[in-house]
Image (cartoon, grey):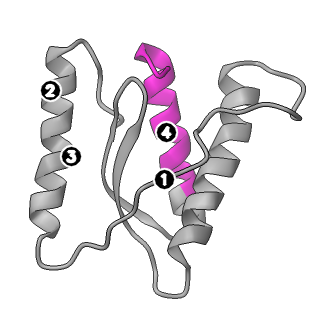
Amino acid sequence: MIYGRLRRQVGRILRELCEQRGVEMLEGNAAVDHIHMCLSIPPKLSVSHTIGFLKGKSAVRIHRELLKERRMTGLHFWSTGYCVSTVGLDEERIRKYIREQQSLATRQGDMDLR
């Protein structure tokens, strides 16, 4: 579960990892049990590789930096799957949807990824 301070720090980790790979995080929002992100991924990178990198590296960093876990084997943070859709002419609508998820989450006591 992603709450409060942990939520902001997870957002920071994901933004840093995106920057490392040259991926632009256009929008991001963390709910209690999942994350919405609108990413601009360079054509030279595959979507599956990028998501795998973000999930894998962020899980390690979350366990080390935030949860202070010393062992690295047998640990899990993210679920095994993910949902991806390409965005073309409807990019602004998708970004608005992500922002509105934040509005809904704020009313429910959540905070922004940014």
Earlier sequence position, callout 1 versus callout 2: 1
* Amino acid type, callout 1: Tyr
The residues tagged by marks 1 and 2 sit, at their Cα atoms, a distance apart of: 22 Å
To which residue does mark 1 refer?
A: 82
To which residue does mark 2 refer?
A: 104
* Residue 27: % across, % down: 28, 52
- What SS does tag 1 mark? loop
Q: Residue at the spot x=12%, y=39% of the render? A: 100
The dominant secondary structure in magenta is helix
The residues tagged by marks 4 and 3 sit, at their Cα atoms, a distance apart of: 17 Å
* Amino acid type, callout 2: Leu
The residues tagged by marks 4 and 2 sit, at their Cα atoms, a distance apart of: 21 Å
Q: How many residues crowd around disc 2 within 10 Å: few (fewer than 14), some, or many (20 or more)?
A: few
* Amino acid type, callout 4: Arg
Point out the stretch of residues depicted in magenta: 1-17
Earlier sequence position, callout 4 versus callout 1: 4
To which residue does mark 4 refer?
A: 12
Q: Residue at the spot x=39%, y=63% of the render? A: 84
Is the Cβ of the residue at disc 2 closer than 8 Å to that at disc 3? no
Q: Quadrant of residue 45?
A: bottom right
Q: Nearer the viewer, mark 4 or mark 2?
A: 2
Q: Nearer the viewer, mark 1 or mark 3?
A: 1
